[in-house]
Image: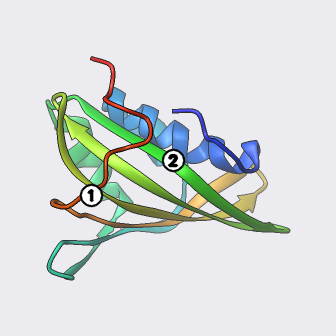
Amino acid sequence: MVWATGNDAVTVVPQKLFDAMKAHDSVAALALFAPGATLNSVDPEGKVTVTPVEKWAERMATGKNTLLERVWNPKVMEQGSIATVWAEYDFHSNGKFTHCGIDSFTLLKTESGWKIASLSFSRVTSSCAPSPLGEPAN
């Protein structure tokens, strides 16, 4: 996925995460997160689930499904060593649409570059508008 707008140094980090997910590469994924980072998911009923990135990476690495997450219309805000990226997304597993929503990344600039401090996302399973990216390539 190519980010439509924003600071490339910031937006490249979420894209690297999506690439690691697609490759089931937990080592590459974990390298993108700051220590203590969490994934915060809100399901269609509003239930919030907080998952340490290490647990998420373990599940992602052992999964067999082909994963594709695409984002568009990113909004990037940056000041000094803190940035946020907010973007609409859709998610596909084994080539089939599963859900859409909003990704909200909080990133911190460290000595080794931008790291994800948290990733919060909504999971919407119905009434998703068609992606402006069109159908994913197989």
| Helix, strand or loop under label 1 | helix
Disc 1 target residue: 55
Residue 70's spot in the image, x, y percent? Answer: 41, 41
Q: Nearer the viewer, residue 96 or 109?
A: 96
Image quarter in which the C terminus is found: top left
Residue 100's spot in the image, x, y percent? Answer: 29, 55
Looking at the image, residue 16 sits to the left or right of residue 52; the answer is right
Instruction: Write the residue at 74% across / 60% down.
Output: 109
Q: CA distance from mark 1 to mark 2?
A: 27 Å
Instruction: Write the residue at 47% across / 42% down.
Output: 17
Disc 2 target residue: 72
Mark 1: few/some/many CA within 10 Å (<14, 14-19, 20+): few
| Helix, strand or loop under label 2 | strand
Residue 69's spot in the image, x, y percent? Answer: 36, 41
Q: Nearer the viewer, residue 2 or 10?
A: 2
Residue 60's spot in the image, x, y percent? Answer: 25, 43
Instruction: Write the residue at 43% across / 35% down.
Output: 133
In this rendering, is residue 32 above or below 22? Answer: below
What amino acid is at disc 2? Answer: Trp
What amino acid is at disc 1? Answer: Lys
Which image quadrant is residue 48 in?
bottom left
Q: Nearer the viewer, mark 1 or mark 2?
A: 2
Mark 2: few/some/many CA within 10 Å (<14, 14-19, 20+): some
In this rendering, is residue 125 above or below 18? Answer: below
